[in-house]
Image (tube, coloured by chain):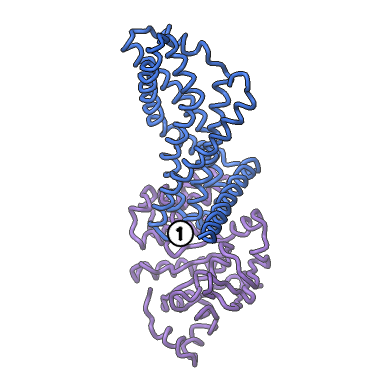
């Protein structure tokens, strides 16, 4: 039993090491010419723009629900005036970034894993190499970079939509005006709340792109393997995001101690 | 001079030895046909030549350069002079047939979009698919995909063309047309290596044939020499005359 556990831990560490090396290679290759600007931009559009409806709608719904929960709690203390600020801080600092990360991991991670996995099993990746194209750079680096670029933008959007959703809920319950709501919401929010929390999602993007691309490049066993890659991309990148988030939050608290 | 040379190449997957001390040379400007039963290492040999696989031991020389020891850029340079038709065509399924053929041109030339499209269309016309430029690969039959793959492999006018079962899935008339295309390419000076089960095709294209069996080269010579071979497997293969 102990031996089996040891083997499991070792293979897990080996996997993490392989993925980390894959990601590190991608970051290195990203700064070495030739650059794949066109392909990267295409993926930013695919990943970012096409995720927008999901992100915006989810953000709005989360804002509505958070507003209702916050009201239920703060009403007891007669602190309803704090609802907009409390909601904005919660969304900007944590709820928005983490939710955006998990949503993108689900939508984009599965897509990248399945697409690259299918290309691997149908020899399309080999075909790219055969026409003298660096498949790693063309397929993996461009997608990883696109995830890194798109994540903070999507996070800013989910934050905004969440705060707007909170306003819709609050105004329908208390009749609070838009100017008063947004004034209160942003009265205590500072750049040190917004910037680090939003930029940390670039790391989420790196994780999503790297894990999904790595799994896609290592897909075997035909269409069944593609299905497994797709599922594993979502599950593993979500777990990695949740775990890395703990480290990143601690780091943000360390770098910005006053606001924490 | 040899365009391609394999020296004592050995390759195993897990415990299974797919290539066992294979030594071959393909002179420049000739067509070389690799014959053999399924699973004897023919496609693996092609993938070694283009550097998609590395030998466990031995050397694969293309134009005198050891493919396995080249850097990424050097290997890309060598590959630019080669075309490869995959057994299952391996067309990029997210772009049109025409763009598949145009892809190598877009990557490796500074031609205008119009010239690239015209060239891609001409290559497709060579394989009888000029009407299918805007179709997606999924809309083509297996044989049409094969022809589109060949058009892509020929897009950059390669000095070396590696072709994995060009006539598989094609009707006999189209298969002979493809053979004619390969012979024309050879006449222009290209070196061609064809993996095939199609004996009529091998007779038509090949200046020389080699037979792989259990990962080893068991026979080598012209089609006539193969016909007169003492080896039972070689004779049986040559008598089969079937495709596929």
Q: Residue furthest left?
A: A172
- Residue B228, given in percent of the width and then of the height, sits at 48, 91
Residue drawn 44% across the image and 65% down it: B87
Chain containing mark 1: A
Between B199 and A212, the one lying in front of the other is A212
Quadrant (top left, top right, bottom left, bottom right) of the C terminus of chain B: bottom left
Residue A79: image location, x then y, percent:
42, 10
In this view, which residue lies farthest toward the bottom?
Answer: B230
Please tell me whether residue B114 is drawn above or below residue A77 in the rendered image: below
Q: Mark yes or no: residue B157 visible.
A: no
Left or right of B130 on screen, residue A201? right
Q: Colour of chain B?
A: purple
Query: Which residue is under mark 1?
Result: A220
Q: Residue at x 52, y 83 (%)?
A: B222
Residue A50 placement: quadrant: top left
Q: Is residue A256 above or below residue A110?
A: above
Tell me which corner region of the image, top left, top right, bottom left or bottom right, holds residue B76. bottom right
Task: Give the quarter of the figure containing the N terminus of chain B.
Answer: bottom right
Where residue A227 appears, as percent x and y from the top left, is: 39, 52
User: Total number of numbered labels?
Assistant: 1
x, y percent for residue A204: 52, 36
Where disc 1 sits, the SS reads loop
Q: Which chain does the blue colour mark?
A: A
In the image, what residue occupies the spot 46% across and 63% down? B86
Regarding residue A52, the answer to whether it shows in the image is yes
Mark 1: few/some/many CA within 10 Å (<14, 14-19, 20+): some
- Residue B10 or residue A4, whichever sits in front: A4
B154 to A175, vertically: above or below: below
Residue at image position (53%, 41%) is A207
């Amino acid at each position: 039993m102990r031996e089996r556990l040891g083997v499991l831990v070792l293979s897990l560490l080996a996997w993490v090491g392989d993925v980390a090396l894959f990601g590190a290679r991608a970051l290195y290759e990203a700064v070495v010419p030739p650059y794949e600007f066109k392909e990267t931009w295409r993926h930013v559009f695919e990943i970012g723009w096409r995720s927008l409806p999901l992100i915006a709608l989810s953000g709005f719904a989360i804002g509505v629900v958070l507003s209702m929960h916050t009201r239920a709690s703060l009403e007891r203390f007669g602190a309803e005036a704090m609802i907009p600020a409390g909601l904005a801080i919660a969304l900007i600092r944590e709820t928005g970034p983490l939710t955006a990360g998990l949503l993108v991991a689900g939508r984009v991670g599965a897509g990248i894993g399945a697409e690259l996995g299918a290309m691997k099993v149908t020899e399309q990746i080999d075909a790219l190499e055969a026409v003298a194209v660096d498949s790693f750079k063309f397929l993996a680096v461009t997608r990883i970079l696109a995830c890194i670029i798109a994540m903070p933008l999507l996070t800013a959007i989910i934050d905004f939509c969440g705060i707007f959703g909170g306003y819709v809920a609050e105004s329908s319950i208390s009749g609070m005006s838009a100017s008063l709501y947004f004034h209160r919401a942003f009265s205590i929010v500072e750049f040190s709340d917004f910037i680090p929390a939003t930029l940390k999602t670039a790391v989420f993007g790196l994780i999503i792109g790297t894990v999904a691309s790595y799994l896609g490049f290592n897909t075997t066993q035909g269409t069944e393997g593609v299905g497994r890659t797709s599922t594993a991309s979502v599950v593993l990148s979500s777990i990695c995001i949740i775990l890395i988030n703990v480290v990143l939050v601690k780091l943000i608290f360390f770098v910005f101690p006053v606001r924490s | 001079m040899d365009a391609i040379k394999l020296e004592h190449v050995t390759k195993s997957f897990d415990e299974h030895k797919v290539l066992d001390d294979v030594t071959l040379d393909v002179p420049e400007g000739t067509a070389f046909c690799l014959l053999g039963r399924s699973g004897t290492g023919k496609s693996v040999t092609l993938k070694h030549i283009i550097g998609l696989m590395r030998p466990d031991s031995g050397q694969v020389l293309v134009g005198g350069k050891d493919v396995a020891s080249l850097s990424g850029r050097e290997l890309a340079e060598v590959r630019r002079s080669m075309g490869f038709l995959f057994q299952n065509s391996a067309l990029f399924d997210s772009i049109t047939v025409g763009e598949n053929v145009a892809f190598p041109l877009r990557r490796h030339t500074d031609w205008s979009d119009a010239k690239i499209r015209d060239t891609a269309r001409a290559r497709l016309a060579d394989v009888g698919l000029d009407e299918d430029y805007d179709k997606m690969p999924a809309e083509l039959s297996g044989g049409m995909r094969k022809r589109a793959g060949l058009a892509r492999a020929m897009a950059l006018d390669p000095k070396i063309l590696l072709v994995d079962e060009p006539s598989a899935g094609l009707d006999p008339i189209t298969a002979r047309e493809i053979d004619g295309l390969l012979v024309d390419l050879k006449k222009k000076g290209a070196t061609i290596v064809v993996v095939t089960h199609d004996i009529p095709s091998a007779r038509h294209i090949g200046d020389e044939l080699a037979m792989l069996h259990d990962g080893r080269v068991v026979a080598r010579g012209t089609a006539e020499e193969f016909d007169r071979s003492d080896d039972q497997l070689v004779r049986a293969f040559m008598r089969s005359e079937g495709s596929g």
